[in-house]
Image (cartoon, grey):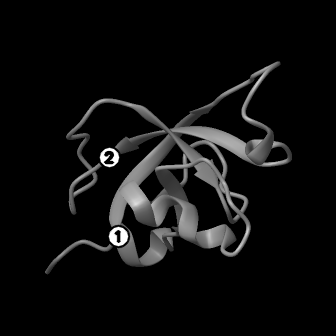
């Protein structure tokens, strides 16, 4: 699992039939301090995340696992939303 921030949505008029009904989001990976560390990429949303939320995601083969046994053409999937209360806590 990795951390990212949702930075946008993807609108598509034509996509792989296995993705019909699934929301596509733009995410940007972050480090444990919330700083951006990699370019933006597309992930399939499995939980209902929204723009601005910090999320957990999986990539590669695991990106299709949230829909198993359904076959979904995905190599990146959002699998959880991080609780901001725990993420933004300052260390004393």
Dot in front, 2 or 1: 1
Q: Which element carries disc 2, helix, strand or loop?
A: strand
Q: Position of residue 14 (x, y in %)?
A: 79, 21
Residue 31 versus residue 15: which sits nearer the camera?
Answer: 15
Whether residue 28 can be seen here: yes
Q: In this view, does 8 lie to the left or right of 16?
A: left
Query: Considering only vertical position in the picture, is 8 above or below 53?
Result: above
Q: Which element carries disc 1, helix, strand or loop?
A: loop
Residue 29 versus residue 59: which sits nearer the camera?
Answer: 59
Query: Which image quadrant: the N terminus?
Result: bottom left
Q: Where is residue 69 in the image (x, y as percent from the top left)?
A: 70, 75
Q: Is residue 42 left or right of residue 23?
A: left
Query: Considering only vertical position in the picture, is 67 above or below 26?
Result: below
* Sequence-earlier tag: 2 or 1: 1
Mark 1 surroundings: few (<14), some (14-19) or many (≥20) residues within 10 A: few
Residue at point 69%, 65% (across, down): 47
Quarter of the figure with residue 92: bottom left
Quarter of the figure with residue 8: top right
Whether residue 59 can be seen here: no
Quarter of the figure with residue 23: top right
Q: Position of residue 48 (x, y in %)?
A: 73, 59
Q: Mark 2 points at which residue?
A: 29
Residue at point 61%, 39% (across, down): 25
Q: Label for residue 1?
A: 1
Residue at point 49%, 59% (across, down): 63
Q: Position of residue 22 (x, y in %)?
A: 77, 48
Residue 84 versus residue 63: which sits nearer the camera?
Answer: 63
Residue 25 versus residue 12: which sits nearer the camera?
Answer: 12
Q: Label for residue 90?
A: none
């Amino acid at each position: 699992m990795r951390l990212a921030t949702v930075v946008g949505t993807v609108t598509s008029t034509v996509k792989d039939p296995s993705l019909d009904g699934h929301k596509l989001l733009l995410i940007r990976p972050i480090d444990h301090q919330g700083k951006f560390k990699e370019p933006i990429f597309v992930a399939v949303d499995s939980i209902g995340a929204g723009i601005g939320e910090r999320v957990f995601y999986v990539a590669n083969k695991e990106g299709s696992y949230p829909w198993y046994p359904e076959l979904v053409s995905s190599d990146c999937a959002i699998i959880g939303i991080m609780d901001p209360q725990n993420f933004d806590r300052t260390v004393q």
